[in-house]
Image (tube, coloured by chain):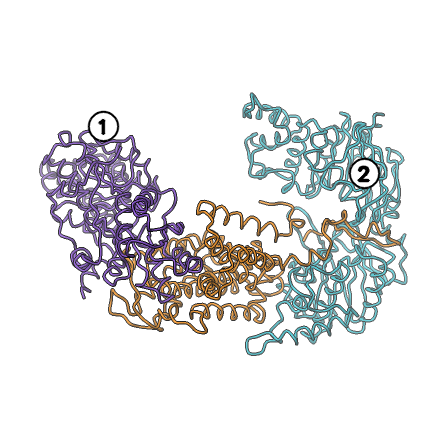
Amino acid sequence: MDPEVSRQSSNSGISTPALREPGRAKLRPRSLRRLRPFAPFFALVVLSLLVGALNPRFFEFNNVVRIANSAAIPLVLALGETFVIILGSVDLSVEGVLAVGAVVISLLVRNDSNANALGWTGAALAIATCAAIGCLNGLIHVQLRIPSFMATLGIWFVGVGIATLALGGSTVRVLDTSIRSLALTRLLEFPLAVWVALGALGLAWVFERFTRIGRYVYAIGGGEDLAVLSGIPVKRVKVIIFTLAGALYGLGGLLAAAQLGMGNALIGSGRLFFTITAVVVGGSALTGGEGGVLNTFIGVLIIAVLANGMVLLGISPYVQQAVQGLLIIVAVALSIDRARLKIVK
Amino acid sequence: MLCVKNVSKTFGVVQALDDVSLEIGENEVVGLVGENGAGKSTLMRVLAGVYAPDRGSLQLDGRSIVFGSPTGANLNGIGIVFQEQSLLPNLSIAENIYLGQERQFVRLGLISRRRLNAAARRQLEKVHADFDPRTRTSELSFAARQMVELAKALALEERTDRHLVILLDEPTSVLEQRDIDILFARVRALRARASFVFVSHRLEEVLKISDRIYVMKDGRVVAHMPTADATVPQLHQLMVGRDRHAEYYRESRQHAPRAEVVMEASDLAVDGAYREIDFTLRKGEVLGIAGVIGSGREELTRTLFGFLPQTRGMLRVNGREVRLNSPSEAADIGIGYIPRERRVEGLVLPLSVAVNMTLASLQAVKIRGVISPKQERELAKHWVEKLHVRTPSVDALCLQLSGGNQQKVVLSKWMNARSRILIFDHPTRGLDVGAKEEVYELIRDLSDDGIAIVLTADTLEETIGLCHSILVMRDGRVTARFDASPGSKPSQVDLIRHMV
Amino acid sequence: MGEMSICRFLRPQRNPGKISVLRGACYFVSEFIKRIYSNSAVNPPNRGDLAAHSSNHMNDFTYPIPRRTFIRRAAVLAGSGALASILPYRVHAAEKVTVVNSIRSLSNPYHATWNQGGQAFANAIGADYVTLVTEGDSEKGIADIRAVLAKTGGNMVLNVDPNDSPDARPIVEACVKAGAYVVTQWNKPADLHPWDFNPYYVAHISFDGVRYGEETANALIKAIGGSGGIVALGGILSNTPAIERKAGLQKALDANPNVKLLDLQVANWKSSEAFSIVGSWLTRFGDQIKGIWAANDDMGTGALEALRAENLAGKIPITGIDGIKLAVEAVSAGEFAATVSWDPYWQGSMGLAIPYAAKTGKFDPVKEPKSHREFYGTGSLVTKENADEFYKSHIESAPKIDFSDLWGRVTGQIRE
């Protein structure tokens, strides 16, 4: 709080209008600026219309179901990541924790390699394990003061290592029908996994808007110094959020085991990119304090629609990767307030 | 009721508060005035629980008390409205007012937004502000945010039985007159529920609103009187009255500048900061710019080095009209900048002395496109000798040097780059007396060499002592010009009169 | 249902050759104390006795030795203690041979099985066994190999699946320099040949991606009745196996004009990506899809689950490549039309048996034809007909391998 930070403002006396408006005329009218938070939503709509115009089968109900199905797991993962990012940190351990979750579940419920058949208790245990790993993330970050980037990077590999150790490198098949029913049974035409993901979204939204911790996440992201001065238990909140993220990744692991019918150490491979992209594309700022789970919901849909659309339109596989990369750049460019950033690293 | 007893506070070399005692009674407005750096803000922060005093104590209703944190102060009824704001821009008004206090609105684990907003509305009513409590604070104007902060401070009423004390730290320096009137009306109306401490450099305002006035200077309370007994000139005198040792500033070395003009400004303006600035700067001249925070002098300084290009008017350097869009452009035409925060803006601390010295003039040490470390060190050794920089070697890291020597390294950097115009921004901040004197010598040396200097100094004394001419700014305009040749230097009261 | 043997696949690897660092440290400390004690002038045993008594490799230590030399050597030993976790308890300069497998990771069933094959071979000949894991890091792979070469003094054979083609050269050169016999598999630069590094670079084994891509494609075409539309899931575009197998698919398509390739998408060897792609395909092509060709089993199983979610499992045949357990089971269940097994057990064991045979003089690499130096191994096509039997012989139990049959699976020299 530098007392001598200069401010552009008007001064006493009969002030001329010129002095009251700092800087030169803005390039965009104010109304357009107010629409910025809705940019991702518009992007989603435009994208959908575009794909649908080129291939009307996009709008078929079955396709909507398929898109929802392919978005379910990423949504759950991205919810966890969202809270961490709003906090101003980042969580790279998604793949590792998800692997642990999937592996633990596949070993505890009825499977083809041991005699366990713990059913939903097993699922709960797996999610609890992942929550514990998330808690570890939080503690390492908060107590040992290791930047979240490094702490979660380490836990990522530890997670994959644990999963490898548990299975000796092989794959275990999940035979428990009630677990598999998450993916195979449909409610109102949508697989249960989709409903689970939507349920998680709802709970996350309530958490974000109506609980104190949800509020504190934004306060910490918006100005951690101020949050500390206001008596907010910053360390505790951070640990809780990482734990919550871990639990959500564990839920993702459960859904993945159900969807693919198996557990192995590499089941999470490649999912981190999707997760972080979804959060960023949805409009949550990587610097923290901005965004929310609804933003992430839109972000996940954008990526799922894009993936579906590229296949529907027969876009060459060589081009698809470039498109995904471009997506991130465009999304971030549209959503950050560049006027406020002087130094960009 | 609330007493400050013999409080002292030191930050490193700087003694911010020296045996300060103060009393704040119920239902009164206490004014606190003093120059930049007199210790007003520090005292406010000690009262608000942000800093703990090194010596001395605070007393509430006769009992000694330690706050430990701003929350502790809050619980004892003390709230502060900071000069630079402390609202979280990404939260709503209601969320900000009740930040950390949401528990009272929680039912079944969930915050009732309805009740939160209703409560916030009630607080806003106290200050007659009818904003929608759901608005994000980033969308409010500065004045509006000021009101919200006031409401936030007043909300403390609900949390404590104690009498409220609200500390207002320079609340008006960036408000329009209209808004200032509103603020004062509120403060007067609220006297029944709270005491206020009003810190400002605008003496007329202080006289208007406060019941009693304390005057601080150099970390001490030098005077204390009922407002009825105070006049502006008297306050001026108390604020700055200090003997000036002519030789401290090497005034005997002050020679008339040369005739050649190196920089000229005509009707220079940056919208929202300053306007109608005219001056000429000659070779060997030291031009001082005096003004309080918000006077526009900081922005003017930044314009001269390319941080803040002017929106109107003309700036001429060495006869050519220029518009400096970035510091590197300024450096290219021979302007150097010795910044206020040298540790952050002037040096790359983890790098060595030699590297820092050549940072602005790497062309000079390149051989066939590659930096020659040998040449770099030769140059560095030259400057170390010339400026008497005390360093174990030219390879020592800058963070190992003392403040004064760091300042010399910054200076060498620009002299290496053959700058002919140097802008000094608070050059002696944080330096001890000996180091300060060295800097003054250097300034005289530079001036003798024909280098022109624009000086924004920490204290009026420095400005008067070092400069050939002085521009006084207030509220974005030049309010006075002084010729400060030795023998006919203006007094500090002369300057203060045009600054506040 | 064969739970016991499956369990063996699931337990973490136990290699009697590995010791814990703790054990090594304890050993070192006890030796240190012994040496210090016997350093006293009271009872100097003679040198010959000591050498006879020492039941280990410390023939560096002669008695009496100055303390400084001792400490210096102790430091060397402590340093090599860092390798203790991967080295056998006893390493003799001129006694027991060490057999070494270097693979990418143990996190996937393919390499896990490879490792078991190597273990079995080591047990069979009573050699010490070491597994090196690169984790996808070429530098680590090469460094680990150099370390083992140094420790064993070259008294070892190496079977390596290099992380990337260029890695093969430094590895081979290091082995040749140390006098160790080496076999490479899968990846090597095209201009690196075993016959240029006689006799130490014994052989390079690979599998013909084109051939097996074609075989599985043919199996798929047969399963769909010879005509109709199919879709293809490819691996990471720049990987050689992905390119080769795709080429094989293309050959099969060229030979069957009634079969149309509706689309090829890249699922990067991952089942989760295959899952999404198949979903989108069903929207785009609907009933037109008669079969799905996948460049590996992971993608194939992902596709299978996508079908299962739409109640189409078993109705649209799928083929994969790799021969993992899930795939073979799927073939038995009629959900997969075919898969190909490389038999990593064979790769892990014979990859050691061949250089070992060369080392022990059973054959002279110089005298072998080029088709024994750089050859394609045999993959087994697993279809409905032989799935059950293959499962019993290769997955439920360890395959029976005749380690003396060196060239039994050579199918031809690698194309130039």
Q: Position of residue B180 (x, y in %)?
A: 83, 61
Q: Chain of mark 2?
A: B
**Front residue (pair A52, C327):** A52
Image quadrant where residue B324 sits? top right
Identify the residue at image location x=38%, y=55%: C274
Above or below, A144 against C214 in this view is: below
Q: Position of residue A6 (x, y in %)?
A: 74, 49
Identify the residue at image location x=49%, y=60%: A57
Residue B204, visible in the rendered structure: yes
**Front residue (pair C195, B204):** C195
Which hue belongs to chain A?
orange
**Residue farthest to the front, as pictured:** C258
Q: Chain of mark 1?
A: C
Image quadrant where residue B492 sits? top right
The residue carrying pointer 2 sits among few (fewer than 14), some (14 to 19) or many (20 or more) residues within 10 Å by Cα, namely: many
In the displayed structure image, the side of residue C279 where residue C382 appears, left or right: left
Is the N terminus of chain B in the top left, top right, bottom left or bottom right quadrant? bottom right
Q: Which mark is residue C122?
A: none
The residue carrying pointer 1 sits among few (fewer than 14), some (14 to 19) or many (20 or more) residues within 10 Å by Cα, namely: few
Judging by the rendered image, the residue that carries numbered circle 2 is B288
Judging by the rendered image, the residue that carries numbered circle 1 is C196
Q: Secondary structure at mark 1?
A: helix
Image quadrant where residue A230 sits? bottom right
Which hue belongs to chain B?
cyan
Going by the numbered disc 1, the residue's amino acid type is: Asp
Q: Secondary structure at mark 2?
A: strand
Residue C33, visible in the rendered structure: no
Q: Position of residue C47 (x, y in %)?
A: 11, 35
Going by the numbered disc 2, the residue's amino acid type is: Gly
Q: Which chain is purple?
A: C
Q: Position of residue A286 (x, y in %)?
A: 56, 54
